[in-house]
């Protein structure tokens, strides 16, 4: 009974954290894009730097009419946003926020994350197909192709920390990096840990469909990709899972390569783990936003080319080298 | 062919990485540059001298000569004037031109105005000029007609009434004078008829 209550409490906590993060991240991204383009971004709503802007936008989205196209496959159309959101939320079960702050320390945590985030591809395909719209379908197809392709280098580079720690459990992976930043995985087996980290990071940008890999929703060609026909709350759901996903991939990167909740220097351990963890994740989120406002969108063939011709062989070789390193050097 | 491909492969990877880093350094630099945005309703650019915006006029300066209305190519200025009664002093404009006319109506229709500025040079007193205020949005076309005359309709009515009376008086006086003249002519000894002599 206590277990159930605790689980529900954790779930509620995670969902409210997600809401807060999305509200903050959308505002922050708009400010950041403004500053990077010598503009100001939202300034009016809420007084200081327009901090209420996303809340106002969210309220607006929630109040909008929920339009379902006449020719849409209605059950699938209704279901798709929830599936995507569940795929996102599922990953939070094994993300370690702190030493004891984790939904469930599965012994196959890493495997579980890779598995559950693949559900998102299904949700996107559902949304694209059921909308009965060319843009949506194209967007969904591109997105599915992209996610499935990039899952391979992601999986291969995520295996590098697993090989280093000899475990798939997230807490064990974090514990193996404890003691100081020199123990973090991206500095292990130099430079192979770093290569794995860079490949993971780039591939994760593609995984969450953000610029420069946002071809599934390239506004100039596909209007809004698989979300074209969605409006109101359902659209808000897509939007939210997009930003939540941004956090998930950054959190995974922080956990596996940047030491998770462990502090960078041994004498800094008095600062609680969740703060370190959130700080590291936010740095990665910032870099993703930074990339987004720097690079233009790739073409589909370039995107696939980068994945299959560069990321895949490199991550594969990297994994093999690291495996031998662990066997012989350590 | 194959070696070229191989060379290109690593070169391209290097190019991809390095150009991304260059781009990122550019954007991070712009992050700390002051923005160029002007927060419009809170701050405004000063309007340049001589900007052609709305027509504005200084009613006290106007002599009612109508030169501006005649110059206007689109008839955007409508003026109605009334001659001042004898003995009424309307004062002078700042450059010493004597005012002789009541300006009953001075309307500028901003919906018609093409902001050509042709009405400005003919004005003898410099009463008409461009304004530097540019927020001239109105909801209806009627509101775009600016009434510059400061006379109220009552004043206008009184002036018109006085004018009519004066005119009537003058006419009556004239008629009387004419009648008196005729009478005098009648009572005078008969002279040979002019018309007869002419025919
Ligand atoms: S600016 Fe030109 S159009 Fe406008 S009132 Fe003067 S003369 Fe007429
Ligand atoms: S030209 Fe000048 S003085 Fe004459 S009517 Fe126009 S504004 Fe008045």
Image (cartoon, grey):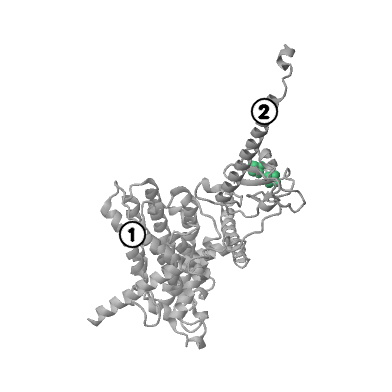
On the image, the x and y values in percent for residue A296 come to 54, 55
Kindly identify which residue carries mark 1: A81
- Is the distance from the Cβ of mark 1 to the nearest ligand 1 atom less than 8 Å? no
Q: Are marks 2 and 1 on the same chain?
A: no
Q: Residue at x 47, y 64 (%)?
A: A315
Mark 2, Cα crowd under 10 Å, few <14 / some 14-19 / many 20+, is few
Local secondary structure at mark 2: helix
Local secondary structure at mark 1: helix
Asked where in the image residue B35 lies, by quadrant, the reply is bottom right
Mark 1, Cα crowd under 10 Å, few <14 / some 14-19 / many 20+, is many
Tag on residue A61? none
Count of residue discs = 2
On the image, the x and y values in percent for residue A188 come to 50, 75
Residue B173 in view of the camera: yes
On the image, the x and y values in percent for residue A225 come to 41, 52
Instruction: Provide the chain ID for the residue under circle 2.
Output: B
Q: Residue at x 40, y 67 (%)?
A: A244
Seen in the picture, residue B169 relative to A269 is either above or below; the reply is above
Kindly identify which residue carries mark 2: B183
Ligand 1, what quadrant? top right
- Is the distance from the Cβ of mark 2 to the nearest ligand 2 atom less than 8 Å? no
Asked where in the image residue A102 lies, by quadrant, the reply is bottom left
Seen in the picture, residue A204 relative to A172 is either above or below; the reply is above
Q: Residue at x 48, y 84 (%)?
A: A179
Instruction: Provide the chain ID for the residue under circle 1.
Output: A
């Amino acid at each position: 009974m206590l277990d159930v209550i605790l689980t529900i409490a954790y779930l509620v906590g995670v969902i409210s954290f997600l809401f807060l993060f999305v509200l903050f991240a959308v505002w922050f991204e708009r400010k950041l894009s403004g500053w990077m383009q010598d503009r100001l971004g939202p300034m009016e709503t809420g007084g200081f730097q327009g901090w209420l802007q996303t809340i106002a936008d969210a309220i607006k989205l929630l109040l909008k009419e929920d339009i379902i196209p006449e020719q849409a496959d209605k059950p699938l159309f209704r279901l798709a946003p929830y599936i995507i959101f569940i795929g996102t939320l599922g990953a939070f079960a094994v993300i370690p926020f702190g030493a004891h702050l984790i939904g469930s320390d599965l012994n196959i945590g890493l495997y579980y994350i890779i598995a559950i985030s693949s559900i998102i591809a299904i949700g996107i395909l559902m949304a694209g197909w059921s909308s009965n719209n060319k843009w949506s379908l194209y967007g969904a197809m591109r997105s599915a192709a992209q996610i499935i392709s990039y899952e391979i280098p992601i999986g291969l580079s995520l295996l590098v920390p697993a090989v280093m720690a000899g475990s798939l459990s997230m807490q064990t992976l974090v514990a193996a990096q404890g003691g100081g930043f020199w123990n973090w995985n991206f500095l292990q087996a130099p430079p192979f840990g770093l290569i794995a980290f860079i490949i993971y990071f780039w591939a994760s940008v593609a995984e969450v469909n953000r610029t420069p890999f946002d071809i599934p929703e390239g506004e100039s060609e596909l209007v809004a990709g698989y979300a074209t026909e969605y409006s109101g709350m359902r659209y808000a759901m897509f939007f939210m899972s997009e930003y939540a996903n941004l956090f998930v991939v950054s959190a995974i990167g922080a956990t596996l390569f940047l030491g998770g909740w462990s502090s960078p220097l041994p004498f800094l351990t008095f600062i609680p783990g969740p703060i370190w963890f959130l700080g590291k994740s936010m740095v990665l989120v910032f870099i993703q936003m930074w990339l987004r406002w720097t690079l233009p969108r790739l073409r589909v063939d370039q995107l696939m080319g980068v994945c299959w011709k560069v990321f895949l062989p490199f991550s594969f070789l990297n994994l093999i080298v690291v495996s031998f390193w662990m066997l012989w050097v350590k | 062919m194959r070696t070229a491909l191989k060379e290109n492969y690593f070169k391209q990877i290097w190019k991809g990485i390095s150009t991304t880093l260059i781009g990122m350094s550019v954007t991070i630099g712009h992050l700390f540059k002051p923005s160029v945005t002007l927060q419009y309703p809170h701050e405004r650019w000063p309007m340049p001298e001589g900007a052609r915006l709305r027509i504005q006029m200084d009613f006290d300066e106007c002599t009612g000569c109508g030169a501006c209305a005649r110059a206007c190519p689109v008839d955007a200025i409508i003026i109605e004037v009334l001659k001042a009664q004898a003995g009424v002093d309307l004062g002078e404009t700042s450059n010493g031109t004597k005012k002789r006319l009541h300006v009953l109506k001075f309307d500028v229709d901003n919906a018609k105005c093409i902001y050509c500025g042709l009405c400005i040079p003919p004005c003898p007193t410099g009463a008409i000029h461009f304004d530097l205020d540019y927020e001239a949005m109105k909801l209806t076309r009627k509101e775009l007609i600016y009434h510059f005359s400061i006379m109220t309709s009552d004043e206008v009515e009184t002036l018109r009434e006085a004018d009519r009376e004066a005119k009537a008086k003058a006419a009556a006086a004239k008629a009387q004078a004419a009648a008196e003249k005729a009478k005098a002519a009648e009572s005078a000894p008969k002279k040979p008829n002019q018309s007869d002599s002419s025919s």
